[in-house]
Structures are given as structure tokens and as C-alpha cells.
Image (cartoon, rainbow, N blue to C red):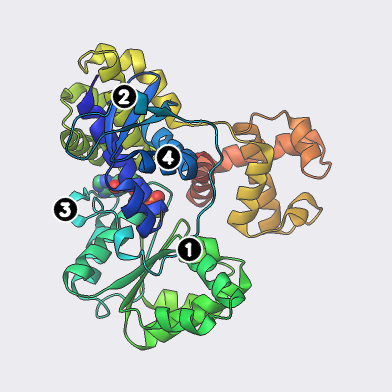
Amino acid sequence: MTDQTAHSIWEAVLGDLQLQVPRPSFETWLKGTSGLSLSKERFVVSTPSAFVAEMLEQRMYSLINQTIERTLGTKVELSFKVLSPDGPTMGEANERSHTGKVLNSHDRNISDSSPARLNPKYVFGKFIVGKSNDLAHAASQAVGEGPGTTYNPLFIYSGVGLGKTHLLHAIGHELRSKGISPIYATAEEFTNEYISAIREGKAEEFRSRYRSAQALLLDDVQFIIGKEQTQEGFFHTFNALHMAGRQIVITSDRPAGALSLLEDRVRSRLAGGLVVDIQPPDLETRLAILRTKAEEIGMAVPQEVLQYLAERVHSNIRELEGGLNRLNAYAQLSDRAVTMDLVKGAIADILHSARPRRVSDQQVLDAVCNYFTIDENTLKGRRRDKPTALARQIAMYLMREEANMPLTAIGRFLGGKDHTTVMHACQRIGDQIAIDSHIRREVHNLREALLAPH
Ligand code: ADP
Ligand code: MG
């Protein structure tokens, strides 16, 4: 049924995959595919040949499946059906189902995949501007129009799912339309590439490639924190580009001042440009976003339904989109129109899937240590200086709230602390969240990082 839904969902999935898969692989394997049909159990994707179907199954099945899950918010079984490019289906015999093969991690090489890795949907024209993001938007536009001349570097930060990557890509598109080719990379890719360049004795190539960039767009720079060697590499690249007047745009999920481990010299240059943040969107903006996205996927949704959804999903825009996609799928699958009744019946599903999973104690610990750049032993230890104590208390709070752990188990997990200590920490952080916007933001960011699909 519902070919249109399958089609638009697969388009969204492809947009996402394009960012995850090296360009040559994307072009070869994914480009000619399309969404055929979607039912409760199964999502069928068409491929132009049996060979492509086989490759996708063997090499990319779990990646694709995860991406679908993230887009749709539910589990479905993925299968491929061979359709010759302009002919009819070659028959049921060609429909394949997954056989449980494990994905091989494929080489990532961003050098030749940079341009394609700009998501075509992330353009300024599709960015809804509201009070929460207008500064970041204006600064990004200024940089797109006059790279290297206005704000350099431009530094954008916010919690997850609030539009950093979207703006960064929009700048990239704008630059490319002016004939300037930026290098776009996530800090994770930058790191991987840097490390393997060094390992393979190709450090010089790495350097000259980055240093000849006409502009550098680096996403999620927080990933580099604490990786000393990469920080060093980043600093030199940054410095060379900055001296040459090339535009640099950096995003992060935490404020510049909190990039505690980026060396001072980098930090002072970061502060020399412009730092803008994006706040969670207000109701009005959420409504505008929902309305636009609904139109985009050709979904007729009454105003009151949009309002209802906007009031209930407020943490971030990715979840807002996810909620709408799920609602769409739900309506299609149950063959009903999108009405208040339908939404009220499905709201638990819609909201529930937006919060994908409970997290484990270790995940909380990793996230907190990573966020505050504290090592695990210190956090589990006895140190009581202010930053360590705060990080520890936040870890306790999140283990309680997000991992649902008993107080005693939390105490045990964190190096044998007494359960009353844990209780006190949970109460204290709970109180602080109510009165201290700084702590509220830290906890919000951590929670988002924990619950975001990876
Ligand atoms: P971040 O990088 O901050 O985690 P993204 O840029 O990936 O967030 O945004 C998450 C999703 O929300 C993307 O699909 C993006 O297109 C969408 N989005 C974010 N902000 C806006 C906006 N202001 N208008 C329209 N869509 C937005
Ligand atoms: Mg991002």
C-alpha cells in the first residue's frame, strides 16, 4: 500500500545515508534505489539489479536498517526487490530478505566524498527562522555571502537536533554556488583521517589538502576534545587557514568556553570570531516547522493536530520531524485520515518512539566523562573538587532518571558510594535544574546526547 509514503520515507533515509556512506559507494549502490512499499512488517526497497540488492544486503543492511528505524521510529523488516530501471518488476522470485549477515565496516574516505556529503535538503530556503535560531541563521547567511570577511571563525553551538548541521550544510551549498569549494567534515572524520594519514606516513598530504581548502566546515568539534594529537593537527590546520583569511565554521554541542581541553591558543582564536547559539524552538517556531514539513511530504494535517503535536514535542527538531513521520506512517498503515482522534490514540507511540531506549549505567558514565572530559577513574574516585563533584552528581542523577537504577546500584557502580550520597546528589541536581540555567543546559545536553539515535 501507500507507495507515496514509502517513497518519501526512503527519500529521507537516502538523504541521511548520503551523509554516512562514502560518495562512491553511495553513487554505485544507493542512487538507483527507491521506496516501493511499506506495511506494518516490511519496508520494500527497489534496486535496479540483483547484484545491487545483494551488495546492499551484505554490506549495508544494518546501516540502512538503523537509518530507517531512526527515520520511522519503529522496527520494520527491510527487503529488496529487483526492478529493472525502466521496466516492470522481474517477479517475486527476486524479492530478497535479509539473511542476518553482519555489516562490514567500509573504508571511509572523505577526500573524494566531500561535495556529495552536503545534504541537498539542508539549504537556507528550508530553514525555518524563529527567535531561537535567528542569530545563528543570520550569521550563517552572512558567512555564506561573504566568506572570510565577516565572522571568522563562526562558531555555532546548541543541544542536539536543533539545526547546527543544517546551517553548516546551508553555508556549504551557498559557498559552492559561488564557486568556492569548502571542505566539509565531521570532527570524527577529521580525526580518523588525520590518524590514518599519520599511520600511513601521509601526514603531508593531509596537511596540504586541508590547508588548501577554500573554506573549512567542521561539524561536532566536541569530538576532538581530549584527543591530544588530533587537537594538535586541528590547531595547525585552523591556524594556517585562519592566517590565509579562509572562512572557518565550527559547530559544537557545547559552548566555546566549555571546550576546556582545546588548547588556549585555539580557544582564543575561537573567541576572536563570532559565537552564536541555537536555543530549543518556541511553540510558534515548532508549529511553523511542522506545517512546512507536513507540506513537504504531502501530508494533510489539520491545524489543531499540528498544534497538539507541537505542544507535546518540544525538546528538539529532529524529534519533531520524527513525530510527524511516525504519525504519517501510522495514518497510512491504519488507512485513516490524520484527525485528532487518530493522534490522541497514537500519541503514546509517537512520543514513545521519540524516546528510543533506556540507557545503561555505562552509557551514562561514558557520556558524562566525555562531556566533562573527566576520566572514569576520577569520576569513580574520591576527588571532591567542584567540577568533579558536579560531574559525579550529574552522573548519579542521570543514572537514576534515564537508566532507572536503584540508588544502591548507582553507588556501587560509581566506586562504592553510599546510597544516601546518591540520593542527596539526585535531589541536589533536581533542585539545581529548576533554578540554575547553566546546569539545566548541561543536563539537557547530556540527556539529548544519551537519547539521540546514533
Ligand atoms: P544538529 O546538528 O544541531 O544536531 P540538525 O541540523 O541535524 O541538528 O537538525 C536536525 C533535523 O531538524 C534536520 O532534519 C534539520 O533539517 C531539521 N531542522 C533543524 N532546524 C531546523 C529549522 N530551523 N527549520 C527546519 N528544519 C530544521
Ligand atoms: Mg549535527
N-terminal of the two: label 3 or label 4? 4
Cα–Cα gap, marks 3 and 4: 38 Å
Cα–Cα gap, marks 4 and 1: 28 Å
Q: Amino acid at mark 2?
A: Leu
Q: Residue at x 47, y 66 (%)?
A: 256
Most distant residue in the bottom direction: 243
Cα–Cα gap, marks 4 and 2: 20 Å
Residue 331, label in figure = none
Q: Amino acid at mark 1?
A: Glu
Q: Nearer the viewer, mark 1 or mark 2?
A: 2
Q: Quadrant of residue 109?
A: bottom left
N-terminal of the two: label 1 or label 3? 3
Image height of 63 relative to 166, above or below: above
The answer to whether the residue labelled 4 contacts the one labelled 2, judged by CB atoms less than 8 Å apart, is no
Residue 38, label in figure = 2
Q: Nearer the viewer, mark 2 or mark 3?
A: 2
Q: Nearer the viewer, mark 1 or mark 3?
A: 1
Cα–Cα gap, marks 1 and 3: 27 Å
Q: Residue at x 31, y 36 (%)?
A: 321
Q: Which residue is mark 1?
A: 189
Residue 125, label in figure = 3
What secondary structure is found at the residue carrying circle 2?
strand
Q: Amino acid at mark 4?
A: Glu
Q: Quick one: 99 or 427, which is closer to the camera?
A: 99
Q: Nearer the viewer, mark 3 or mark 4?
A: 4
Residue 305 position within the rendered picture, expressed as x and y whole percent measured from the top left: 23, 22
Q: Quadrant of residue 342?
A: top left
Q: Which residue is mark 4?
A: 54
Number of callouts: 4
